[in-house]
Image (cartoon, grey):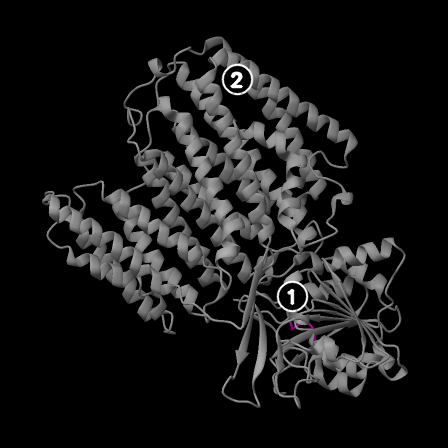
């Protein structure tokens, strides 16, 4: 069970890391992988449930043995026929990016579907077989043991596995460990078939859980597990949207999620009173994080992870409190796995269609955690709220909903005061000596609890009203009208999440001005205005990231602009609208092509087709958002870019404005590796509609860097004491670049 749990989570990280560059590096890649693995986990638990209901232990052992042999044979065959036993080859790379989720699920199904299914059956099936032997002790504790293996897999991947081994080596090593698992599991299967009892219920102790479960218990198991799973995906998205989608940032929330299973299923780690107080504090702090944009990366990260841990401890701890006897073990695990898959499916598939303007999943999941907790507490007649101080409930609700108000403050005093007050209220509420009230009072208290907590948390979900919005696999796009009361300053603003991606004035006299990060004093503006090829005509510019199409404002009749954009919604918003929101592409005198899809994959295919673009300038505007596509900033990616540039005078301009990450060391590492000269151009953003921006310019053309306009505006790329860092497809370290 330990080995199987280790393999389960190692393969999730390995496959997610492999597929990430194929789909733009968006956090939704990992969320989709999680959905796939949880759905297969449900299938594995359902398989275990059906075997325990329909077959004897000996018959189950025979069936499971055949399944083990099939999985080993499949991996062995692929080891010879594929370049990797679990990864599809480059022929599987996407050619369209409109609907990536089905393609990701298909790739995972062909690659690791059967081996993962076999591994997923291990925990419930072996616990069921153990209980059939009549050995003393609760088999539920083995679930905690298996989750220790899962945590170890998560911790070792970013620290040991990823920095040392290439992805293909990781896949081969995982396959060899699967063979080891299969051999041990085959032995256990034979042993279970030889010693297992025909009647499981006769060999278990009624003390190991409830001898029977209440009618609604399975629904509560499912809802609690779904809430925990939804919190995991929502927190991972929230974290990755603010930094980058990399395995290390997947590992942190997933480790906390699994640690809650370890503590709760050890049957000693969940103390209800303590974790209710922790949940209340976490709710205040996470609301503060939502509404205070001045928080640093580490502070925000800590608040989100604390909220995840508190919520998962409550969800999983309450599920364990109402777990059934071992005779119902497979039913319990089946509902837990169904809940996990349901939570992931709702977050990955349904939420984008419900919440169009913001990532409300985390807000709703925390609220749902409170609602479920209230329902469970209503079953406890000795809970403090049924006593003599029901008015304290209202105070608690006010404190829980105080987070948005605290977010308006800048000092830590307000947060510390709220934490102290909530802790004091929590301890004041705890009173085991209170007798149950009358039935009418009970009904009134229950109604007050449910209504107050449900209604109380909703005000934190502030709603914006954009001119237009679109949410898909790649994130949320909104168009806002800026300065609506000032006709001369009115402008449409394009945002991806909280990040500005384009701005265009509505006034005809200012509509053609390049704005945002692309003004005439920005690094890219100076490059386009002063490049020697501009005077010679036939100027060719490539741009990674379309945004509002602002750079097309620099185009002249002889120029050519080639935009690469992975998000179909960005392309639609840059072109369409009634009236059109952005007209940079339409109004430009240059010839313009927009290439849909991931820029790196598109450029690689152009090279394979022997169609290098011979670009004079390549502008890469993909790193100023809340999450950065790491695969566009690696040694392999830059090798592709340089093959599309004119060797002598080609310039790569990289937009590295980012609140969370200082990307200068990575850009400097790439410049040193490819023997390029690099400078930094920082624009304070004083031109109309412009923002502060930082651009790194890389070139072999020393004469260009000595031009007066460039030399005056530029500074050395690295500050004193900074060390260049080279990223590759097999290794990147985001935490080395975090701004303190």
Residue ranking furthest to the top:
194
Cα separation, mark 1 vs mark 2, equals 54 Å
Circle nearer the N terminus (1, 2): 2
Which stretch appears magenta?
Answer: 716-720
Residue at image mark 1 = 570
**Regarding mark 2 in the picture, which secondary structure is present there?**
helix
Q: Residue at x 45, y 68 (%)?
A: 295
Q: Nearer the viewer, residue 73 or 565?
A: 565
Q: Position of residue 192 (x, y in %)?
A: 49, 14
Residue 329 visible to an observer of this rendering: yes
589 drawn magenta:
no
**Label drawn at residue 336:** none
| Residue 560 left/right relative to 174 | right
Q: Residue at x 41, y 14 (%)?
A: 133
Residue at image mark 2 = 188
Q: Residues within 10 Å of mark 1 (few under 14, many from 20)?
A: many
From the viewer's perspective, is residue 610 above or below residue 182?
A: below
Residue 267 visible to an observer of this rendering: no
From the viewer's perspective, is residue 316 above or below residue 477?
A: above
Please tell me in which quadrant of the rendered image residue 325 appears: top left
């Amino acid at each position: 069970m330990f080995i199987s749990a280790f393999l389960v989570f190692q393969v999730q990280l390995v496959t997610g890391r492999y597929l990430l560059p194929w789909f733009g590096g968006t956090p939704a890649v990992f969320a989709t992988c999680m959905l796939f693995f949880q759905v297969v986990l449900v299938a594995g638990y359902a398989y275990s449930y059906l075997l325990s209901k329909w077959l004897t232990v000996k018959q189950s052992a025979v069936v499971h043995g055949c399944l083990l042999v099939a999985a080993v044979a499949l991996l062995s065959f692929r080891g010879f026929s594929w370049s990797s036993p679990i990864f599809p080859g480059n022929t599987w790379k996407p050619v369209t990016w409109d609907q990536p989720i089905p393609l990701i699920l298909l790739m995972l199904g062909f690659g690791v579907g059967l081996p993962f299914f076999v591994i997923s059956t291990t925990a419930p099936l072996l616990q069921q077989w153990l209980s059939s032997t009549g050995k003393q002790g609760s088999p539920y504790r083995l679930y905690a043991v298996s989750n220790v293996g899962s945590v170890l897999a998560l911790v070792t991947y970013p620290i040991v596995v990823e920095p040392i081994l290439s992805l293909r080596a990781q896949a081969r090593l995982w396959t060899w460990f699967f063979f080891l698992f299969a051999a041990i599991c085959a032995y256990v299967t034979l042993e279970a078939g030889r010693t297992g009892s025909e009647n499981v219920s006769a060999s278990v102790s009624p003390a190991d859980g409830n001898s029977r479960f209440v009618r609604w218990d399975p629904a509560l198991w499912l809802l609690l597990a779904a809430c925990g799973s939804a919190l995991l995906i929502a927190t991972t998205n929230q974290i990755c949207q603010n930094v980058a989608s990399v395995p290390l940032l997947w590992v942190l929330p997933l480790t906390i999620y699994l640690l809650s299973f370890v503590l709760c299923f050890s049957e000693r780690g969940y103390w209800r009173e303590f974790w209710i107080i922790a949940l209340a504090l976490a709710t205040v702090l996470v609301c503060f994080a939502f509404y205070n944009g001045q928080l640093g990366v580490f502070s925000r990260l800590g608040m989100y992870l604390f909220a995840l841990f508190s919520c998962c401890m409550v969800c999983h701890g309450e599920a364990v409190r109402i777990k059934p006897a071992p005779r119902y073990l497979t039913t319990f695990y089946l509902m837990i796995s169904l809940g996990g898959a349901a939570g992931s499916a709702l977050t990955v598939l349904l939420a984008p269609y419900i919440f169009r303007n913001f990532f409300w999943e985390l807000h709703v999941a925390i609220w749902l955690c409170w609602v479920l907790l209230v329902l469970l507490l209503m079953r406890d007649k000795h809970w403090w709220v049924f006593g003599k101080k029901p008015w304290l409930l209202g105070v608690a609700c006010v404190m829980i909903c105080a987070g948005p108000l605290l977010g308006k403050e800048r000092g830590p005093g307000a947060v510390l005061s709220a934490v102290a007050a909530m802790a004091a209220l929590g301890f004041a509420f705890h009173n085991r000596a209170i007798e149950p009230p009358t039935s009418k009072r009970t009904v009134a208290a229950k109604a007050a609890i449910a209504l107050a907590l449900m209604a109380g948390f909703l005000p934190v979900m502030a709603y914006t009203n954009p001119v237009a919005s679109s949410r898909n696999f790649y994130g949320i796009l909104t168009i806002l009208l800026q300065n609506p009361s000032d006709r001369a300053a009115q402008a449409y603003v394009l945002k991806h999440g909280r990040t500005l991606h384009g701005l265009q004035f509505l006034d005809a006299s200012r509509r053609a001005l390049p704005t945002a990060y692309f003004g005439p004093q920005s690094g890219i503006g100076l490059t386009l205005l002063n490049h020697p090829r501009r005077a010679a005509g036939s100027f060719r510019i490539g741009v990674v990231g379309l945004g509002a199409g602002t750079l097309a404002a620099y185009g002249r009749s002889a120029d050519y602009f080639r935009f690469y954009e992975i998000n179909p919604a960005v392309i639609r918003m840059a072109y369409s609208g009634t009236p059109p929101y952005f007209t940079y592409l339409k109004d430009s005198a240059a010839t313009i092509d927009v290439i849909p899809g991931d820029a790196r994959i598109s450029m690689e295919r152009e090279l394979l087709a022997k169609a290098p673009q011979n670009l004079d300038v390549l502008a890469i505007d993909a790193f100023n958002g809340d999450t950065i596509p790491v695969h566009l900033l690696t040694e392999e990616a830059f090798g592709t870019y340089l093959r599309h540039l004119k060797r002598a005078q080609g310039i790569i301009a990289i937009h590295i404005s980012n609140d969370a990450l200082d990307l200068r060391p990575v850009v400097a590492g790439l410049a040193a590796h490819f023997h390029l000269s690099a400078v930094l151009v920082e624009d304070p953003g004083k031109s109309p509609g412009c923002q502060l921006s930082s651009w790194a310019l890389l070139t072999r053309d020393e004469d260009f860097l000595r031009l007066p306009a460039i030399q005056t505006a530029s500074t050395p790329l690295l500050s004193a004491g900074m060390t260049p860092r080279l990223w590759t497809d097999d290794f990147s370290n985001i935490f080395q670049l975090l701004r303190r």
